[in-house]
Amino acid sequence: MKVHRAIALLLFILITVWIGMACNNEAKKKENKNIDTIQTTGKKLVPVQPAIPDTVFSGFGTEPFWFLYVIRNDKIIFHPAEGSDVEVPYVTSITSGAGNTEYNSSSGNAAIELTIIKKNCSDGMSDETHPYTVALTVNKTKYSGCGSERN
């Protein structure tokens, strides 16, 4: 009889631990849904659509990996793969004489200069072509990459 109770107790503990781990994994999946990453499918490099409403443009680059989001009437966010995000207030874009779209914004120690060029762009890691080339300066560090409009 004691052996049956010990086995029953052991099974109860194992099932309880298993259920706890399963619930924790589900919570982490929900928590990670709003994190921007790069997903690869074969040779295709795809920036994940941001979970931020009113994003009008998103850009990304490789080596190093980074993302940029222009959020209408709110802010511009630079999200490097390593390090802290840089956020500046949204400003109305300026169209240069060459037809490029430019955003220049700063706040405190943060500064972003973004030039969006209507020129096909290859990210260098996939065969995919993106409709815009991005030239970006964040706090005096220059980046280049690709981008697309979001509506």
Image (spheres, grey):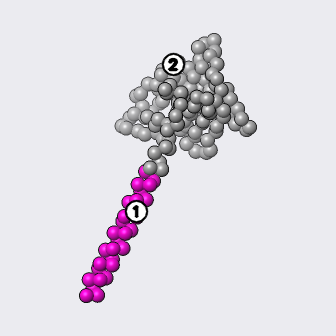
Disc 1 designates what residue?
A: 21
Residue drawn at (53%, 31%), measured in percent from left and top?
54
Q: Looking at the rendered structure, which numbered label has been put on residue 119?
A: 2
Q: Nearer the viewer, residue 92 or 40?
A: 92
The majority secondary structure of the magenta stretch comes to helix
Point out the residue furthest to the bottom here.
Answer: 1
The relative height of residue 115 versus residue 143 in the rendered view (above or below) is: above
Residue 7 among magenta residues: yes
Residue density around tag 1, few if under 14, some if 14–19, many if 20 or more, within 10 Å: few
Left or right of residue 76: residue 52: left
Left or right of residue 91: residue 117: left
| Mark closer to the chain start, 2 or 1 | 1
| Helix, strand or loop for disc 2 | loop
Residue drawn at (41%, 54%), measured in percent from left and top?
26
Identified by mark 1, the residue type is: Met
Query: Which region is colored magenta?
Result: 1-29
Identified by mark 2, the residue type is: Lys
Q: Position of residue 45 (x, y in %)?
A: 43, 34
